[in-house]
Structures are given as C-alpha cells and as structure tokens.
Image (cartoon, grey):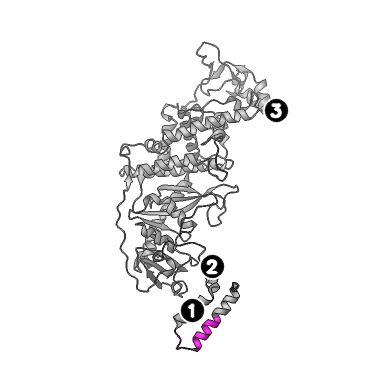
C-alpha cells in the first residue's frame, strides 16, 4: 500500500531525523545515504519541490546556466568592459537642420497624420453626440460645424498660448473685463463658444468600433501611438538612456503614489535621454504583462527599450526596476544596466545586504559580470552595475569648494538619471492642464504641450548650437506662427493726446445688406439686471460702432461712455 503524502511539518521532522543520524555516524557516505532515503520516501521530494516553487514565485527559468540563484558571488571585483556602442544617435531626418523654425520641428511630431486623427474623430464624435441627444435650436451642439486641419492647428495654438498666459478659467481669456482682456484672442477668428465646443468634442478614436472589454486606453491609444512613432523616426538617443515613471495630475480613480509631486494622477512610464528628450512612453493601466523570468518592473524596462537592445547602450533605472534577472537579460541582449537596488530584491548576495558599514565605507561582490555594491553615506545605498567596478572618484559639491569621494557607479547613475528630472521640470513650466478636463484629454495635452514641445525645443537647440532658445522663447515663436500674429492688428498706442472716438457704420455684408449688432453697454446693463438670455432678447441692435473701441453702440450709450 502506497504511503500518503507528508505535510510540510511532517516532512521537516523527517529531514531533522535524517540529519541527526548523519551527524551521529561520520563514516556513512552522506551522498549515498540522503539519496537512498529520498528514493524510499518519494513524497518528501515532491513536497520540497513545491516549496521551492513557492520561494521563487513559480517563475520557470529557461536554463540552469542563466539561473540567478546559482550565481557564484566573489569579493574579487574587477572592472567590466562596457559593450561597444553600435547604434545610431541624433537626428534621423535630414529635413531638420539649422534653417528649421520652431514650428517646422513641432509639426514634424504633430504631422498631418496626427492632425487627421484629431479632425476626423472630433467631427465623428460631434455628430454622434448630435444623434444621441435631443438638442434645441439654441443648444451649443446645434451650432456645430465640422473642424478642418487649419482650425485644429489654431485650436492647438490657443491651448499653447494658455500655457504662456495663465488665467484662472478658460472663459477669462475672452472676457472684455480690463483685468483679463487680451486683444489676440479677439482677432484670430475663434470665439470662446467655438473653442469650448471643439474642446468638448476633441476626440481621438471611434467609439462605435468594437473593442476588448479590458482595453482601458482605447480613448487615447491612436494618438499616443502616432506621436511616439513620429518621435522615434526623427531622433535616436545616445548610449545612455534612463527609464522611470511620471505622474499627470488628475483627481480621478486612476493612480495614487505618495512619493511623487502629484500624488494623484495618471502614471506614465517613459524612456529619456540625459538631455530630457522623451523617446518612448507607456501609460500604466493597472495590469502590465510580464516576460518570462522577469518581474513587472523589469518587463516595463524591456518593453520601453526593446528597439534599443543589442546596440551597446546603458539603461539607467531606479530601485523599483533594477534586479538581477533584468541585468542578466539585458546583458544577454548586448545592453548594460546601472541602477539603485532595494534590499528585498531576490537573488542578491546576503553578505552585501547584511554588511554593517561606517560612513564612507564601500563593500561589494561580483558574479558573472554583475557587480552589487553597498556604500554608506548618510544612509546605505545599494547599487548594481554590469560594467562598473568598485572604483572611487573625487566629486566637488555644487559650490565647487568641498571635494567628496564617491563610487564611480553612483556618479554615472546620477548623470544618466537626470534626463527624467529635466523632462519633468521642463514640462511643468508652462502647463496647460485644467481641473475640469477628462483624463484622456489631460494625457493628450500633457503629451502634445509638454513632451512634444520639450522634445522640439531640444532638437531646435541641437540644430542651432549658436542660436539656442529657452523654452519660453521657443513657445512664443511657435504660438506666433500658429496664430499668425503678424497679420493680427495691434492696438494703437496713445501718446500725448487720447485717440479720437466717433461712431461709424458697421461694414456691410458682401451682398450689400446692413449688418447689425447688439449695443455693447445695453447688453451689459440687461445682463446685470437679469441674465444673458434676457439680455439677448431685450438688447437693441444697431448698425453703428465706435471706430477706436470696435464695439457696437447706440447713440445714447456712446455719449454716456465717451
């Protein structure tokens, strides 16, 4: 009769008996004894196999030679040769040169294909809204007219202008109040009603197309894929790239990260060059697919940098991503890794993790070309590298007066990781995000007005080394081009004496018919008495306007206010 399977407690007791008998008789061949005992009790072997699988999270390894738990760690640390760089870097399009303007570079990213997605899907969504809702003649949607490419560009220009000139609400940009009045938005042929209507219908995908139930990014995926494709076709990063996450502020049920400046929001993974150029990005949607032998953070690193493997690059990652399996995977694909480590990561040498160091001391071990170091500064710092040793170098502080000795691996990490911080810093300067926007529109604005503008500015400065622009200057030139400010009449400056005001007839229509408008001050008076609907009905319409104010007035209001 076969013996029943042992429980975990029983198996541990059985093994204690085996080891006790082994210790009582030194003449017994240990290997033979243990092997014969396991053969007689095959259930013990099964029990311990399942226990080992639990220890390693049921992650099968491809072969024993690449098994991270079998690494032979040594204190003899040797400097590892860096994989030679064989990839392309810099501009990938000859059309971007020292004659390119900010608008030329920006519309290489936001090209006709991206604009077509916006135009087609915005018009489609507006018609879907009209068909699904009962609207009155005076309803805002009832006045919808299809947007074209030029109007979509003008819409984006107004959005970029809002990042330069920051006002509390969108409607404030079109107010006549002296506190908010800006003449530009009254001269570009886009009213507040038209802007708000386009913003409401701004869309990037067809809602009627069948999709998978677990596709959470279908609202934004076509736009992101098109822009990322343009980014990667125009520019290639150099030998060092950094990978980390950023947050787009949003108070919805999406993501909470207490360690970020924006604790609530949409999380993005992005791959950046040390200059802050965002080369690839991925939106976190709650569940990431994992690759074989890699955890979720490691799979994110590989998915973002997949097109950059086997070219001798160096990936810089922080302690959430860095791990021994990731280092082994990248090393096998011609890529080096450098990053900080968490002490609870698997397969790390315990001797390094548990070592007690005084300030300034360094201890590390190496196995199969992977170096793990611990350095004591104000606290313990764990580092991993596939191309660095334990070399120390002198580094001056920010003032350049005090020199401090640091491991070279940490200096290289800080230098490469700065790209993520530069990108976050540059996109935060002239943010166009508004509190009331839907999440996918916030993501679109952050990508277009944040990452694309930053990338365009970096490429402009690299192509114009003798004529670099700050981001504000770059934005100003871009907005001037999109809104065509050269053809917008500027308000006349009054010097010495005030400009003469007089009533004149409003220019007639093309067919010769008289054009009439509501009296400006009569409308304001009626609106203050009741509301805008009452003012629209009761305000008299006149055919005269002030030549200087460019507003319609009846004779009585003109005399009272001039």
What is the x, y in percent for residue 432?
51, 41
Q: Does the magenta stretch include residue 197?
A: no
Camera-side residue of 252 and 329? 329
What is the x, y in percent for residue 168?
57, 40
Camera-side residue of 283 and 29? 29
In this rendering, the answer to whether 274 lies above or below 528 is below
Q: Does the magenta stretch include residue 21?
A: yes
Task: Locate residue 8 relative to residue 157 in the image: left or right.
Answer: right
Displayed quadrant of residue 78:
bottom left
Q: Distance between the residues labelled 1 and 3?
A: 98 Å
Does dot 1 land on a helix, a strand or a loop?
A: helix
**Which segment did they paint magenta?**
16-28
Camera-side residue of 505 and 367? 367
In this rendering, the answer to whether 326 lies above or below 202 is below
Does dot 3 land on a helix, a strand or a loop?
A: loop
Q: Which mark is residue 36?
A: 1
The mark nearer the N terminus, 3 or 2, is: 2
Q: Name the residue beneath numbered marker 3.
A: 530
What is the x, y in percent for residue 125?
56, 32
């Amino acid at each position: 009769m076969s013996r029943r399977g042992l429980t975990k407690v029983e198996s541990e007791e059985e093994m204690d008996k085996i080891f006790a008998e082994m210790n009582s008789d030194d003449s017994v061949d240990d290997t033979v004894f243990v092997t014969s005992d396991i053969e007689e009790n095959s259930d013990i072997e099964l029990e311990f196999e399942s226990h080992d699988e639990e220890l390693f999270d049921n992650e099968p390894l491809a072969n024993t030679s690449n098994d991270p738990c079998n690494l032979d760690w040594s204190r003899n640390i040797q400097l590892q040769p860096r994989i030679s760089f064989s990839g392309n870097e810099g501009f990938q399009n000859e059309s971007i040169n020292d004659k390119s303007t900010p608008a030329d570079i920006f519309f290489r990213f936001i090209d006709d294909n991206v604009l077509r997605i916006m135009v087609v899907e915005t018009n489609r969504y507006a018609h879907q809204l009209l068909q699904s809702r009962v609207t009155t003649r005076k309803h805002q949607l009832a006045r919808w007219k299809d947007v074209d490419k030029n109007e979509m560009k003008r819409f984006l220009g107004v959005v970029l202008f809002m990042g330069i000139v920051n006002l509390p609400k969108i409607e404030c940009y079109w107010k006549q109040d002296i506190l908010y009045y800006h003449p530009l938005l009254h001269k570009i042929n886009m009213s507040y009603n038209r802007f708000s209507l386009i913003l409401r219908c701004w869309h990037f995908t067809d809602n009627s197309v069948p999709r998978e139930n677990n596709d959470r990014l279908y609202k934004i995926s076509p736009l992101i894929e098109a822009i990322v494709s343009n980014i990667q076709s125009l520019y290639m990063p150099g030998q060092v790239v950094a990978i980390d996450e950023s947050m787009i502020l949003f108070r919805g049920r999406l993501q909470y990260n207490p360690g970020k400046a924006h604790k609530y929001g949409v999380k993005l993974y992005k791959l950046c060059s040390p200059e802050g150029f965002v080369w690839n990005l991925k939106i976190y949607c709650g569940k990431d697919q994992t690759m074989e032998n890699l955890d979720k953070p490691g799979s994110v690193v590989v998915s973002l940098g997949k097109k950059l493997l086997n070219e001798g690059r160096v990936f810089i990652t922080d302690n959430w991503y860095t791990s021994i399996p990731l280092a082994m995977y990248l090393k096998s694909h011609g890529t080096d890794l450098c990053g900080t480590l968490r002490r609870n990561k698997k397969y790390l040498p315990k001797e390094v993790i548990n070592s007690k160091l005084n300030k300034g001391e360094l201890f590390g071990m190496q196995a199969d070309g992977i170096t793990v170091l611990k350095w004591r500064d104000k606290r313990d710092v764990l580092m991993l590298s596939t191309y660095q040793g334990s070399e120390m170098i002198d580094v001056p502080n920010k003032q350049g007066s005090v020199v401090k000795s640091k491991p070279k691996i940490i200096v290289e990490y800080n230098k490469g990781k700065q790209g993520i911080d530069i990108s976050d810093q540059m996109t935060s300067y002239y943010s166009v995000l508004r509190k009331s926007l839907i999440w996918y529109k916030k993501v679109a604005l952050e990508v277009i007005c944040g990452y694309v503008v930053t990338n365009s500015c970096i490429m402009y400065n690299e192509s114009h080394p003798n004529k670099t622009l700050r981001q504000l200057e770059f934005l100003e030139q871009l907005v001037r081009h999109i809104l065509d400010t050269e053809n917008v009449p500027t308000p006349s400056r009054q010097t010495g004496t005030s400009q003469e005001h007089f009533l004149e007839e409003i220019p007639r229509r093309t067919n010769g018919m008289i054009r009439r408008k509501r009296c400006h001050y009569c409308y304001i008076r009626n609106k203050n008495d009741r509301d805008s609907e009452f003012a629209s009905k009761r305000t008299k319409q006149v055919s005269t306007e002030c030549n200087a104010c460019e507003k319609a007035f009846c004779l009585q209001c003109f005399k009272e206010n001039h």
